Image (cartoon, rainbow, N blue to C red):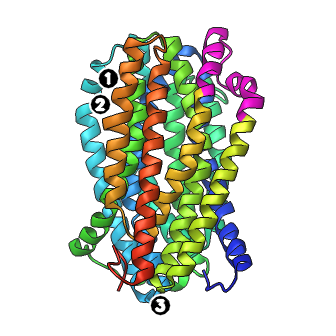
Amino acid sequence: MKKTFSTKEKILQFMTILWPILITQISLSAMVMLDTVMSGNAGARDLAGVAIGSSLWVPISTGITGILLAVTPIIAQSVGAGRRDHVPFTVIQGSYLAIAISIIVLICGAIALKPVLNTMHLESPVRDIARRYLVGLSFGITPLFIYTIFRCFIDALGQTRVSMFITLLSLPINILLNYVLIFGKLGFPRLGGVGAGYATAITYWCVFFIALYVLHRVEPFSCYNFFKKWLGISFSAWRTQLKLGIPIGFSIFFETSVFSGVTLLMSQYNTVTIAAHQAALNFASFLYMVPLSISMALTITIGFEVGAQRYSDAKQYSLLGLGIAVGMAVCCGIGLLLFGDQVAGLYTKDQTVFKLTQQFLVYALFFQLSDAIATPVQGILRGYKDVNVSFIVALASYWVIGLPLGHILSLYTPLAAFGYWVGLIVGLAIGATSLLIRMVIVQRNAAMGGKKIGLCK
């Protein structure tokens, strides 16, 4: 990251940071997408089982990742303010925190997984696949969370291409492992959808070790000397990270869990409806990587400028990011309209599931525009370390408005299962509008030098 003096320089720097993040996020999302696609080709029950398992895991995973993402603005502002000596301490403490959180998740999962699945109206084979898929995946939770901290550090320095290369190296590993474990190739047993969980866990370990090597051997990361001095646990540092990270994590959790909540509520419908809904939602989540990547790039660039107290530059990056996000959303929407049949065909060979997936994909179009505003604005606010309002907005727009409205529409209108999607679209639009208002307030306060909410002094 460096100081920029013109709009052209800002565009160049922003795109240099953005495109590797986009490829990284698409690749990470592709792992989940491949689990679903390849499991769907193993059978409708495998698709439904992995769909249920993913619906339980994704909100937990993304919520906790959100907590750990607090490391990004902390490091970005430290670098922008010239306090590079504080960076290694932040990364090490973040890694300790990641290990502690992973242990808590594993314990809670061991206690709660079976009772949660038993409360759902699922066919016995689907329930069993979902449980075993999550058990397999659980072996990779700890390295995944630690890698998240490493990646936050790498990205906060503006070296997003490094994260991209690490992820791209891991993608073929995941594809190969899915192939041999799901379909029983190369002498391995045929595990169906369950194999996708073990394949993903092994891939997470590979990503962790690759990142560990990079931090230890590759410049400019090795100059921070993470491994030359032992640092004990600092609960005050954990408290600082959690104070910023918990609102971020819960904001993301409320957003992702509401979609999982819809999937769980859809257990009242048949396996075909669950499979079609999950296929469409899986692809919508794949498209979501575009605004999410822009959001992450905005957190890095704005955090750097705010750390240096260049608030006018931070505002320029905000407008730039939002413009790119809206433009990309329009392109993705047009692409989905033109190639909806091909997308549905990726997930299933069952004609009934295929036709229903096509219908669900139509509603995915409307997610794109609201996501193109709400998600980048969240990244902007994180750059200012303003996270509490995003947390409240996410709770209200999704769980107070979106899900209840969707449930009412599903019960009392001909929309049936599609009613949930309509409710969520309304909630997302309300959330986007509210976050825009908050962004204007925060930027105005910063520009006036008044109450700088969450800014480094």
- Label 2, label 1: how far apart the Cα atoms are: 6 Å
* C-alpha distance separating marks 1 and 3: 50 Å
Q: Are marks 2 and 1 in contact (CB under 8 Å)?
A: yes
User: What is the number of the mark on residue 82?
Assistant: 3
Amino acid tagged 2: Leu
> In the image, residue 65 lies at what x, y percent?
41, 54
User: The C terminus is located in which quarter?
Assistant: bottom left
Residue 219 appears in the rendering: yes
Residue 117, labelled with which disc?
1
Q: Residues within 10 Å of mark 3 (few under 14, many from 20)?
A: few
In primary-sequence order, the first of circles 1 and 3 is 3
Q: Residue at x 35, y 20 (%)?
A: 408
Residue at the image point whose x is 45% and y is 80% from the top: 447
Q: Position of residue 317 (x, y in %)?
A: 59, 71
- Look at discs 1 and 3 and give the one toward the viewer: 3
Q: Residue at x 49, y 83 (%)?
A: 79
Q: Is residue 9 magenta?
A: no
Disc 3 on helix, strand or loop? loop
- 329 left or right, relative to 150: right
Q: What is the three-letter code of the residue carrying label 1?
A: Leu
Residue segment shown in magenta: 336-362
Dot 2: few (<14), some (14–19), or many (≥20) neighbours within 10 Å?
A: some
Calculate the distance from the C-alpha at mark 3 to the C-alpha at mark 2: 46 Å
The relative height of residue 343 versus residue 257 in the rendered view (above or below) is above
Frontmost residue, 419 versus 110: 419
Q: Which residue is mark 2?
A: 113
Q: Is residue 366 above or below residue 293?
A: above
**Quadrant of the rendered image containing residue 196:** top right
SS of the residue under disc 1:
helix
Q: Main secondary structure of the magenta part?
A: helix
- Give how far across and how far down residue 170 sits, in percent: 62, 51
